[in-house]
Amino acid sequence: MRISQLAATTDVPVATIKFYLREHLLHEGVLTSPTQAQYDESHVRRLQLVRALLGPGGLTVAAARDLLQHIDHPPESQHDLLGIAHHAVHRPVPEDLDLGAAEKLIRRWDWQIDERDRDTPAALADALRGIANADFTLPEGALDRYARVMAEAAEAEIADLPTESAEAAVRYVVLGTVLVEPLLLALRRLAQQDASSRRFASAEEAAD
């Protein structure tokens, strides 16, 4: 198909497709003349993936390009996939951030964390600092409850890791991290609304 057909099939403007080509988010088509190229279903699938990474995934062009390179050239170790995915979604934190409180929690939960990974413990430390700076006190045991829920979810996710190929595994881990985190946040907010409605609606009905 020509680029105009690719645009119509994917509902992505031609100008945007050309931008993705320049930024190496989309692989080149097969040249049929100096100014024309043919595209196929692989370009359709890649465009859908790029739109998901830049849209719901919230990645920058540079982060998406890095992830796509890892999908095309998976690392040998499946464990390294998590580091790739987590690096894509982490936001910068101060280099001098004290990780003491985060590391203490990680030890208490007996979580086996890659010692090369500073970003993820730092993200936890930054979140804890934000809570403390806002003078917000979590209910007693809340952190442990959150940890138990996340541990259960993580066990299920890792158990579902595809083993048929490295490419399938990296797609699962990378996209599962980047695209599912917004889903988890949306589910949490919906569950909060449900819990609030059930609790306070029941209380109001009892008062009537």
Image (tube, grey):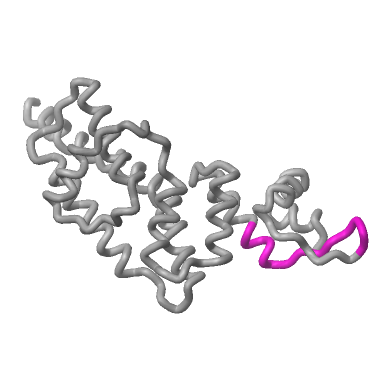
Residue 109 pos. (x, y %) = 14, 52
Q: Is residue 65 above or below residue 91?
A: below
Q: Is residue 207 above or below residue 109?
A: above
Residue 131 pos. (x, y %) = 23, 28
In the rendered image, the residue lying farthest to the bottom is: 164
Q: Is residue 85 magenta?
A: no
In the displayed structure image, the side of residue 80 where residue 23 appears, left or right: right
Instruction: Write the start and end of the magenta stretch as one range.
Output: 33-46
Tell me which residue sits at (52%, 43%) in the image.
59
Residue 144 pos. (x, y %) = 13, 45
Numbered label tally: 0
| Quadrant housing residue 44 | bottom right
In the displayed structure image, the side of residue 40 where residue 140 appears, left or right: left
Q: Is residue 168 above or below residue 136?
A: below
Tell me which residue sits at (81%, 64%) in the image.
38
Q: Is residue 34 magenta?
A: yes
Q: Nearer the viewer, residue 79 or 95?
A: 95
| Quadrant housing residue 93 | top left
Q: Which quadrant would the N terminus be assigned to in this image?
A: bottom right
Tell me which residue sits at (54%, 44%) in the image.
55
Q: Is residue 203 above or below residue 85?
A: above
Q: Nearer the viewer, residue 198 or 31?
A: 31
Tell me which residue sits at (58%, 59%) in the image.
69
| Quadrant housing residue 155 | bottom left
Q: Which quadrant would the C terminus be assigned to in this image?
A: top left
Residue 113 pos. (x, y %) = 26, 55
Q: Nearer the viewer, residue 162 or 113?
A: 113
In the displayed structure image, the side of residue 191 where residue 38 appears, left or right: right
